């Protein structure tokens, strides 16, 4: 019978043999998961990448701030438990949201991902992951702002949880010194060269004054400006970011005080938005302009992508302390110099680093899920 000792033995021998034949599965419980593939959606949603590209282009034309917002969003997803869309989940009973963690409070662009997702759900329901939408939208955004194209495989799946504590503890701080920044990136597998090239993403978008105010007026409690700041840059930054009485409004966090975000983001707004005249986007898309605080930018878009950022650092004109700190190390300083003078080297390195970031710790079948709405677990 089946319960005889010999048949039990032979059954377990078969199982054991399977494990031996698949040695990787034996060593790594995740190795049985599928790999990302080139054009994963070619059968189940052939239009997916095109839809994402078209929508990002369309929104970018109406509001260029869309692109930097999406790039930063992808970074903050991939850096916390990998590119799994965990950043997109809203808080629910028993689960905090990464969106509410201090480093993420100034993130924008969630509604754009939700909009693209709802469009994809109409075309091919349940097929395209939010995690793939995020990295693909970021790729289009990089390209639109003057950065390189990079190929991405697809087939990422969405997490079934958010990781608010990891977001709080693992995302890099704008006040970090070089060794802290390097340690943070190295813990995710990025070396010094890759770290320097990734920070060049600050070429695009804006940095609000609250993230570097301390450097202008009271650096590390000295009541003096940051000595690493060029004096001309100091004057310019002070006029953009006048001294304010910080005691008047309690900051949610000294490290990451950011603009509060509107909490309801409805994908159904999308069609209304597309039908609306461009001017109405100013108030509806991204942060309402009335809550927008003062900010500075490197203005490194178009042909200046990369080079302007690194040249600013060479001149002591880094906006964030963490940016300027790239000049404080021998090897990182070397890469800053190289990228400042060689745009094609930078484009290549940034492309490779973005590919690595976009593939960081992805979830693939049978793990994870395809969410139907990016802000909720399916
Ligand atoms: C040490 C590492 C980093 C720190 C401390 C940091 C911090 C910040 C801060 C404080 C802002 C300003 C946000 C605001 O004012 O609303 C910002 C903006 C931005 N960051 Fe980073 N960041 C880092 C690395 C990266 C990386 C690796 C990327 C992408 C690959 C990235 C992409 C961006 C983009 C595109 C913006 C502009 C966002 C916008 O205009 O909407 N950052 N970052
Ligand atoms: Ca994540």
Image (cartoon, rainbow, N blue to C red):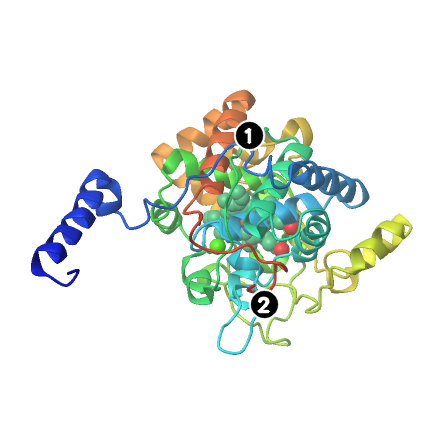
**In the image shown, does 138 or 159 lie closer to the viewer?**
159
**In the image shown, does 215 or 93 lie closer to the viewer?**
93
Residue under the image location 25 percent in, 41 percent down: 24
Asked if residue 139 lies left or right of residue 336, the reply is right
The count of marks equals 2
Asked if residue 80 lies left or right of residue 179, the reply is right
- Label at residue 90: 2
Looking at the rendered structure, the secondary structure element under dot 2 is loop
Q: Is residue 144 visible?
A: yes
Asked if 343 appears above or below 355 in the picture, the reply is above
User: In the image, residue 165 lies at what x, y percent?
Assistant: 43, 66
Q: Is residue 226 visible?
A: no
Residue extending farthest to the right is 277
User: In the image, residue 273 lies at what x, y percent?
Assistant: 84, 54
Looking at the rendered structure, the secondary structure element under dot 1 is loop
Asked if 253 appears above or below 29 in the picture, the reply is below
Quarter occupied by the C terminus? bottom right
What is the distance, in whole Å, between disc 1 and disc 2 at their CAs? 30 Å
Mark 1 packing: few (<14 Cα in 10 Å), some, or many (20+)? some
In the rendered image, which residue does mark 1 sit on? Answer: 150
Asked if residue 303 lies left or right of residue 97, the reply is right
Residue under the image location 70 percent in, 57 percent down: 111
User: In the image, residue 376 lies at what x, y percent?
Assistant: 59, 65
The reply to whether callout 1 and callout 2 are in contact (CB within 8 Å) is no
Res 202 quadrant in image: top right
Q: Earlier in the sequence, mark 1 or mark 2?
A: 2
User: In the image, residue 297 lies at what x, y percent?
Assistant: 65, 44
């Amino acid at each position: 019978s089946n319960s005889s000792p010999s048949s039990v033995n032979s059954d377990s021998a078969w199982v054991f043999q399977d494990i031996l034949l698949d040695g990787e599965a034996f060593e790594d419980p995740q190795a049985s998961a599928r790999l990302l593939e080139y054009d994963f959606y070619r059968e189940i949603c052939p239009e997916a990448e095109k839809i994402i590209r078209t929508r990002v282009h369309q929104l970018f034309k109406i509001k260029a701030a869309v692109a930097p917002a999406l790039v930063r969003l992808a970074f903050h997803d991939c850096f916390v438990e990998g590119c799994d869309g965990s950043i997109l989940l809203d808080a629910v009973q028993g689960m905090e949201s990464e969106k509410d963690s201090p480093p993420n409070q100034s993130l924008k662009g969630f509604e754009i991902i939700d909009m693209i997702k709802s469009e994809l759900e109409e075309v091919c329901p349940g097929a395209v992951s939010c995690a793939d939408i995020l990295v693909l939208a970021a790729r289009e955004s990089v390209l639109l702002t003057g950065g390189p194209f990079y190929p991405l495989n697809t087939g990422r799946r969405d997490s079934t949880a958010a990781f608010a504590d990891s977001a709080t503890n693992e995302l890099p701080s704008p006040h970090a010194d070089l060794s802290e920044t390097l340690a943070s990136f190295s813990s995710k597998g990025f070396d010094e060269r890759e770290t320097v090239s990734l920070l060049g993403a600050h070429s695009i978008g804006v940095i609000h004054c609250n993230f570097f105010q301390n450097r202008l007026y009271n650096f590390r409690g000295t009541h003096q400006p940051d000595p690493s700041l060029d004096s001309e840059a100091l004057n310019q930054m002070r006029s953009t970011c006048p001294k304010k009485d910080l005691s008047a409004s309690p900051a949610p966090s000294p490290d990451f005080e950011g603009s509060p975000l509107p909490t309801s983001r409805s994908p159904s707004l999308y069609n209304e938005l597309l039908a609306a005249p461009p001017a109405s986007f100013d108030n509806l898309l991204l942060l309402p302009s009335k809550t927008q605080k003062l900010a500075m930018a490197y203005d490194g878009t178009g042909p200046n992508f990369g080079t302007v950022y690194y040249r600013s650092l060479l001149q002591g004109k880094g906006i964030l302390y963490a940016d300027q700190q790239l000049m404080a190390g021998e090897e990182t300083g070397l890469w800053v110099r190289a990228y400042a003078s060689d745009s094609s080297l930078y484009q290549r390195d940034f492309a490779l680093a973005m590919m690595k970031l976009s593939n960081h710790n992805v979830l693939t079948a049978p793990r994870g899920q395809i969410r139907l709405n990016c802000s909720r677990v399916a």
